[in-house]
Image: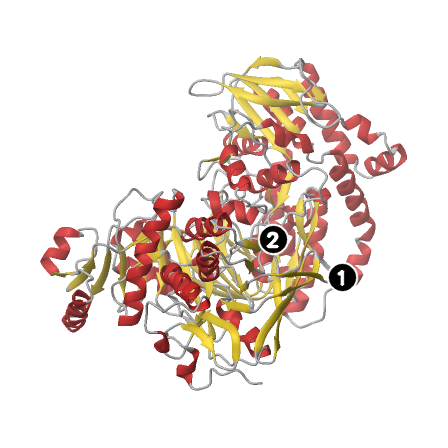
Amino acid sequence: MPDPGAARHVGRDERGSPLRQVTGTATGRGSYDVAVIGAGPAGLTAARAAAAAGARTVCIDRYATPGGQYYRQPADASAGTVTQRRGRRLADAAWAAGAVHLPQTNVWSATSGFRLEAIGHPGRSVIDCRAVVVASGTHERVAAFPGWTLPGVFTAGGMQALLKGCDLAAGHRVVLAGTGPLLPVVAAALVRHGAQVVALLDANRLLRRAIRRPLRTVITLAGQPARIVEAARSSLSLALRGSHLRTGWAVTAAHGEAQVQAATIARLDANSRPVPGSARTVECDAIGIHFGLVPATGLYQLLGAALEHRPEFGGHVPLLSPTMQTSVPGVFGAGDGTGVGGADMAMLQGEVAGQAAAAYARGTGSGDSALARRKRRALGNAARFRALYGELFSMPDGLAEMSDGDTLICRCENVSRSDIERARARGAATSAAIKSLTRCAMGSCQGAMCGPVLDGLLAAEAPGEPPHQPQPLTARPPLQPIPVASLLDGAS
Amino acid sequence: MTSSSAADVVIIGGGIVGTAAAYFLARSGADVVVLDRDPAPCQASVRNGGGIRAQCRNRLERLLAMRSIELWHELHARTRTSFEYRAAGNLRMALSSATLARLDSEGQEEERDGLHVEMWQQAELRRRAPYLDHRFAGAKYCATDGHANPILATWMLVEAASSAGARRLPAATATAIETRGGRIAAVGGQSPAGAFRIETPTVVHAAGPWTRQLATDAGVDLPIVPARNTMFVTQAAPPVFGEFVSSHEVGVYLRQAAKGHIHVGGVFTTEGTFDQSVSVSELERMARAAEILPLLRELNVLRAWAGTLDMTPDHMPVVGAVPGLAGYFVAAGFSGHGFCLGPAVGELLGRLVRADPPLIDMPALSPRRFGRGEARP
């Protein structure tokens, strides 16, 4: 019997879009063995593995169609790239194994037991389960620079979402900057779409870093043939249209009246600071910024899972056992949210986590560590890549210097760098204290955008002191804004 | 390696009460050290609803609150620091005519003490506060009451105390109150720099719900119980109301802050716990504020949090000396009323420590009223 509020797949329409039968009333209640939060590569794989192991499984996702970021589906389901079709097959496999899909639903509270509170279509849902797999991914890291709040400045991932999901290029003359393999991937996708990439900049001197330990680099890349092919494909697309990746460069300012019209780009020195005299102006109508991915820790915090700060993984990540269990029995993690490592690693982890969560929920043991052992070689390859990724694409320290006094650090609450410096002058030394005095990170995004920027400012302004150990901004329910009205209907 | 120093007064607890005491004592020339276990104020003083009111209190607290409001204005003028203090009135709502009648009697007592209030019947309430739900029978309105941003207000007082010469040791946890021959001798504790010991003849103990444990170690038994109190805040809305509005019948209070966010708090508490995680049922109870302000139904909850109150059996604070232990003054158990009363209590403590005549009826606040507020040798 499908639970109220859940969506059951009943085939596809003539355009290939999945048909979903939504059952039940506005306030959904459901009881499952395993709840998987997130329907990206990790979540879908975990849902399939848990369901295939006999657990009653629900896969809760904020988007209408599954796939997360990596397998983001096109609006027209009959179209799509090879990758997107692979993502659709992954989702279909999860539903075919018996997992229930709960789309357009955001989990905003998670308490032990476990009970998840969610909001979305249709309305409020309460999900009880015996085990949870957190596969909620990451959010993009940005840097603040003068003009970054002009219309036309996107994140690179946002540009990719527009392309994948809406077949829309963010601009005609695009600048992409930051650090990370996503930049050339998005650049290549844009040029294939017909846009011009007028500058493609990675702040890190990648080749220099890669050849620091040449043997390690070669071995790591040898274990990633698919990535080599993708990189070659991207490079070719770009080269054919006159673009190439420039390393050791960054965007230092965006200019325009009502929207972006130009960017200032500059070469960076060894401390990642703009080299005087190297600045040039590039005309553009869109800028894509991306400084890597930051694992989302809200759900882990609510559930009490222990976290550790691993900058090479993107930020704070949960401590995990070989079967992907966190420090809280019954809570498992998988995917980029446990440390940025890409889709292949996410699916390997999802397989292990889903299977272990099912075993935990059904009381049949602590998970198939034999499975974890079988996957060890693949996981090892993936872990080596993750380590290389972390080393090549680390957040350059000096970029905190790019903002000036007027630059907004917190976009939601309009807090400028000067506001933050005034708070520091009053004795606010931690991000929590600065938040209290300025309202930075107290707005709608709850610090998702400005948190890492604030940490960068604090670290940069305290040279010579012991390394700044950032704490994750405390997560409390609701994890995202929820309507007051939803708390009045269907009260427990 | 224990660092040693000395002071005239050591204040344990750097929230609004401890800091206010530091301000007044430093201004009178005492060498004061404030110990706070957090790097910056982060407990009840900065988590509360920010209400600054004199109405709807028992008489003793009313008089303290009236004095406190004078001091809040004075501090505002003297420091010229904004803490978003807005005196646009306090509205105590009445659903039933019985409640309205009770508020009317209370209003007459308040007038006798010089606190001017107005009784609004239903028609007048609808005219003067049209944004409120029409179900209420009326309200009592006090025009001189208001609210402020408790974070900025506490920081303002911390800076004022420092300017007056008080020393503040952040991230310094007091772990021992040393006595000798029935007198205070020193306070010992831990900080990131290591252990410390401060010789002093006087301790002001204003550590909220954390006062009881350490006081016990000094032989003083205080009936203070921790309790969780919750709040949430909405996304910013266009300015709609300036009053601090509360209804004990619905069980919530609310105000609109400087940038338009609406702060909602519960009148209810969960006793016996230091746990500060907000439950879904507490969120649901607070959402009932929409029964007072229908606009809330169109807004989103942005963030929720909890603070820990220090409750006494009669919900009145414990302020005063403890017989048998010379030099020890307690100021805790504010039962949710500490923020507004802070400045007046700080002034009171300054006078107590200096043995000046008190401005207020001290026995009613004394630890002795519980029959066991006496130090064990």
Confirm or deny contact between disc 2 and disc 1 (CB under 8 A): no
- Both labels 2 and 1 in a single chain: no
The amino acid type, in three-letter code, at marker 1 is Met
Between A341 and B275, the one nearer to me in the picture? B275
Q: In this image, B133 relative to A310: left or right?
A: left
Q: Is residue A418 above or below residue B306?
A: above
Structural crowding at the residue carrying mark 2, measured as other residues with C-alpha within 10 Å and reported as few (<14), some (14–19) or many (≥20):
many
The local secondary structure at tag 1 comes to loop
| B241 relative position to A189: left or right | left
**Residue A118 shows in the view:** yes
Identify the residue shown where x is 53% and y is 17%: A172
Q: Which residue corresponds to the image point at 20% horizontal and 66% vertical from the top-left?
A: B113
Q: Is residue A21 left or right of residue A229?
A: left
Q: Quadrant of residue B339?
A: bottom left
- State the residue position of label 2: A94
Q: Quarter holding the N terminus of chain B?
A: bottom right
Residue most extreme to the left: B123
| Residue marked by disc 1 | B1
Q: Position of residue B371 (x, y in %)?
A: 43, 86
Which chain does the residue under circle 1 lie in?
A: B
Label 2 secondary element: helix
Give the answer, above or below, for where A59 lies relative to A169: below
* Quarter assignment of residue A178: top right
